[in-house]
Amino acid sequence: MMYSSRRKPVLYFKEDRRFLSWKCSILKLFGLCLVLVLVPLLWLQLSCSGDMNGGHTAEDGHLPHQPCSLDRQALLADSPSWGPHKMAVLIPFRERFEELLVFVPYMHSYLNKKKIRHKIFVINQVDHFRFNRASLINVGFGESGNDTDYIAMHDVDLLPLNEALDYGFPDQGPFHIASPELHPLYHYKTYVGGILLLTKQHYQMCNGMSNRFWGWGREDDEFYRRLRKAGLELFRPVGITTGYKTFQHIHDPAWRKRDQKRIAAQKQEQFKVDPEGGLTNLGYKVESRQELTISGAPCTIISVKLECDQNQTPWCLLS
């Protein structure tokens, strides 16, 4: 069919309008998809924040107990805004079940609110020897997998109440969150216990922690010397104004003679530096590994039996 010259632009305009209409439809569809993705994520973030905070602050001492559901938190953790690093939270553990039931959901929600990728590992000592916190942390370091690049040596009875505390990747050096100025119980300058963050590379440089400390205490003091020997600078929080109310201590007051008593030569040996022991002479056997959820919060329970050379450390048994 032939058209006059005056009609061609009209036909051309109609075809272009169809093109523009199709293009607008694509843009509208893209915008709709974007809204459908961002709105649920925003709602999940706000709901998770509400679950964690619960309207309470460090001053009133209340703790939230209902974290976001596992599915919702997993969806949020896939966001690129959470960063590339992932923390292995290592919990040396034995018979502290009431504290664990509080700790796991609380910390999972707390870290999610701060957009910290993490996995919680509960290293459960099931042998007949005395408790060995340092060896259990060494075990957790080795069992935490390649998908985590830094660790938190974290006591199960210490909960952070101040949201300004930094659990991010400690690239500059070991970061002692539970500093002497903030910890509710321990205030001496060389204290590095409670909560300490290290990159896996830095922990390897220290050869981990000494395995000679059976029973509670002193392993942190020896590890402080290891940090200095490795040439690592220790960092601590600044600008935290909540003082000794920064953490809630939920420690079980039960007296455990097996773990708290000093026996034999242990009283003298506990103040010595272990120049060779650590990751290189750690002996253990994994009895079981279980993936659990506690109030919707995931954790990995690794039950282990430690090995003890009674010629070297006879105080691993309570005579």
Image (spheres, rainbow, N blue to C red):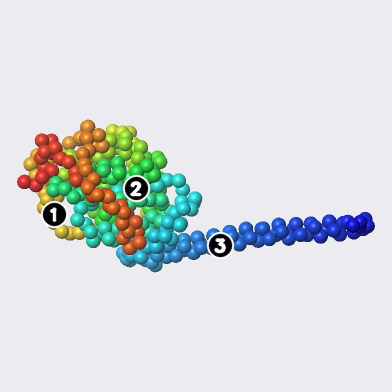
Residue 212 image offset from top left, x and y in percent? 17, 39
User: In this view of the protein, can residue 259 be seen by the observer?
Assistant: yes
Disc 2 to disc 3, how far (Cα)? 33 Å
Q: Residue furthest bottom?
A: 55
Instruction: Write the residue at 17% across / 41% down.
Output: 307
Instruction: Write the residue at 16% across / 44% down.
Output: 214
The relative height of residue 97 versus residue 187 in the rendered view (above or below) is: below
**Residue at label 3?**
36
Categorize mark 3 by other alpha carbons within 10 Å: few (<14), some (14-19), many (20+).
few
Quadrant where the N terminus is found in the figure: bottom right
Query: What amino acid is at disc 3?
Result: Leu
- Which is more N-terminal, label 2 or label 1? 2
**Closer to the eye: label 1 or 2:** 2
Disc 3 to disc 1, how far (Cα)? 55 Å
Categorize mark 2 by other alpha carbons within 10 Å: few (<14), some (14-19), many (20+).
many
Is 142 left, or right, of 310 in this rendering? right
Label 3: state its secondary structure.
helix
- Which is more N-terminal, label 1 or label 3? 3
Categorize mark 1 by other alpha carbons within 10 Å: few (<14), some (14-19), many (20+).
few
Is 34 left, or right, of 310 in this rendering? right
Instruction: Write the residue at 38% across / 53% down.
Output: 165
Question: 90 or 32, which is in the foreground?
Answer: 32
Is 258 left, or right, of 96 in this rendering? left
**Residue at label 2?**
88
Instruction: Write the residue at 34% across / 56% down.
Output: 298
Question: 12 or 197, which is in the foreground?
Answer: 12
Is 157 left, or right, of 316 in this rendering? right
Query: What amino acid is at disc 1?
Result: Arg
**Residue at label 1?**
256
Residue 167 image offset from top left, x and y in percent? 38, 50
Query: What amino acid is at disc 2?
Result: Ala
